[in-house]
Image (tube, grey):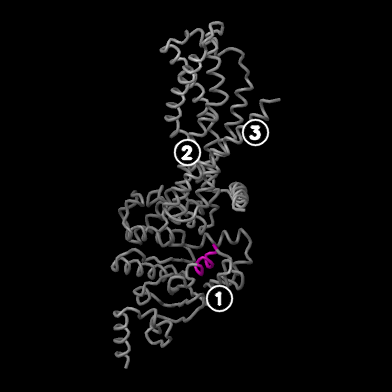
Amino acid sequence: MTYLHNIGAYFLMIKDMFRKPTKWSVMRDLIFKDIDDLIIGSLGIVAFISFFVGGVVTIQTALNITSPIIPKYLVGFATRQSIILEFAPTFISIIMAGKVGSFITSSIGTMRVTEQIDALEVMGINAVNYLVFPKFIALMLYPFVISIAMFLGIIGGMAACIYGGFSTVDDYITGIQLDFIPFHITYAFIKTFVFAFVLATIPSFHGYYMKGGALEVGKASTTAFVWTSVVIILLNYVLTQLLLSS
Amino acid sequence: MIEVKNIHKSFGDAHILKGISTTFEKGKTSLVIGQSGSGKTVFLKCLLGLFQPEEGSILYDGSIYSEMNTDQKRHLRSEIGMVFQGSALFDSMTILENVMFPLRMFTKQSKSEMEDRADFVLKRVNLEDAHNKMPSEASGGMQKRVAIARAIVNKPKYLFCDEPNSGLDPKTAIVIDNLIQEITEEYNITTVINSHDMNSVMEIGEKIVFLKDGLKAWEGSKENIFKTDNEVVTDFVYSSELFKKVRQMYLEERH
């Protein structure tokens, strides 16, 4: 029953997010602030992880290709496919669920604990729109982060290839251009937009409806991370089935 | 003026407010007092429209809150100032931005007009050099004064304060009490304060409503509270030896 209640409350929160909009001049500032906090603030960690995981994917692929009849350019091909299809959109989203999700839950949860949300409501402000909508809009720039993750993942793979001596630059570049299907990029970005919505709303829900004090803010952040990850993994499966299996 | 007529509020099986009626007049500081669990906070949240009573009605200057449409309720909310127990300042904004916030949300003033108004009310609460501080850098007393400044910046008709003295030393508490009373008289607003601080009762209680177990057990002024022989009130108000002596002296003086 609790799960059903929470799912219902979540969808009501989504509805409230679009009701009674906050004055545009205030909303604009909130959106810019959230772009800075959620998107710009995540670029460093995303770039670091993407570069090195791209390298690891390349090394693992190269080390597992033992047959001499398999061409070396397949290392680049496998790296590109892994990064564009799964690593950048899904793996990075799980990391963002930890980084951005816990930030959203704890900041909104702290506002709940310290009566700041009550203060907004007493003033007649739609607190859900004020707090969640700018995060939702800011995370619509999430595909930009994922593009950087894709690019740096492939560059990281190339660096690992060169410095590890697994294949030549020419082979790697041939591999990443081999049998390129543009729809795979579309598929990756469709997933990214869906995950961005999940990243903005599930942590906000856990922060907004939390009860208790500082300890509960920590618990809500953990719960938000778990549920955001679970929903991302489930939606990843559903979207892959829908978009790639036809 | 706020009129409360026979309001009832329950949560599940717990009947919290059991038919409270009273009136809070314009330009006067009214206090709602009572022990913890007496229903003070629920009563205040009903007045603020955060809880909807199951029975009874609340009238703001003659208009019944529950019969207002969304726009009327929104307009009324913009005329309400609220000072929360923990100040509830927005911790991502400076003190000046906190005070300007209601103006940014509800007026079409230019930035310089808003700054002038915020500056004026900050001076009114004796905070002249704190504009660019963050709330976390301000003391408890300063935070309360900023909360009062934010509550009055948009010239509200109604001011609500939930235990404005909690966590403050007695001297600062008196400063805050007097400030609220001065502002109430100066701007001719209807002020309702939730409190269990007896110093506040004696200092600024122009009207006192005493709640016990969700019922109005007594109401009167700070002068009347010395004279009352209502045991429920005297047990609560004169629970400390100091207040017992103050009352005794007051009664002896009168005789």
Query: What is the spatial separation of the Cα atoms under label 3 and label 1, in whole angstroms?
Result: 53 Å
Q: Where is residue B63 in the image (x, y as percent from the top left)?
A: 60, 69
Where on the picture, by quarter, is residue B123?
bottom left
Q: Same chain for labels 3 and 1? Say yes or no.
A: no
Chain on which label 2 sits: A
Instruction: Please tell me whether residue B46 belongs to the stretch shown in magenta.
Output: yes
Which residue does the image show at 40% across and 76% down from the upper left? Answer: B205
Label 1 with label 2: CB-CB less than 8 Å: no
Q: Is residue B177 above or below residue A43?
A: below
Which residue does the image show at 38% across and 76% down from the upper left? Answer: B201
The amino acid type found where label 2 is placed reads Val
Q: Same chain for labels 1 and 2? Say yes or no.
A: no
Residue stretch in magenta: B42-50
Q: Which mark is residue B18?
A: 1
User: As drawn, which residue projects farthest toward the front?
Assistant: A67
Which residue in the protein does label 2 denote? A100
The amino acid type found where label 1 is placed reads Lys
Element at badge 1?
A: strand
Looking at the image, which is closer to me, A109 or A70? Answer: A70
Instruction: Please tell me whether residue B181 belongs to the stretch shown in magenta.
Output: no
Which residue in the protein does label 3 denote? A238
Query: What is the spatial separation of the Cα atoms under label 1 and label 2, in whole angstroms?
Result: 46 Å
Mark closer to the chain start, 3 or 2: 2
Element at badge 2?
A: helix
Where on the picture, by quarter, is residue A71?
top right
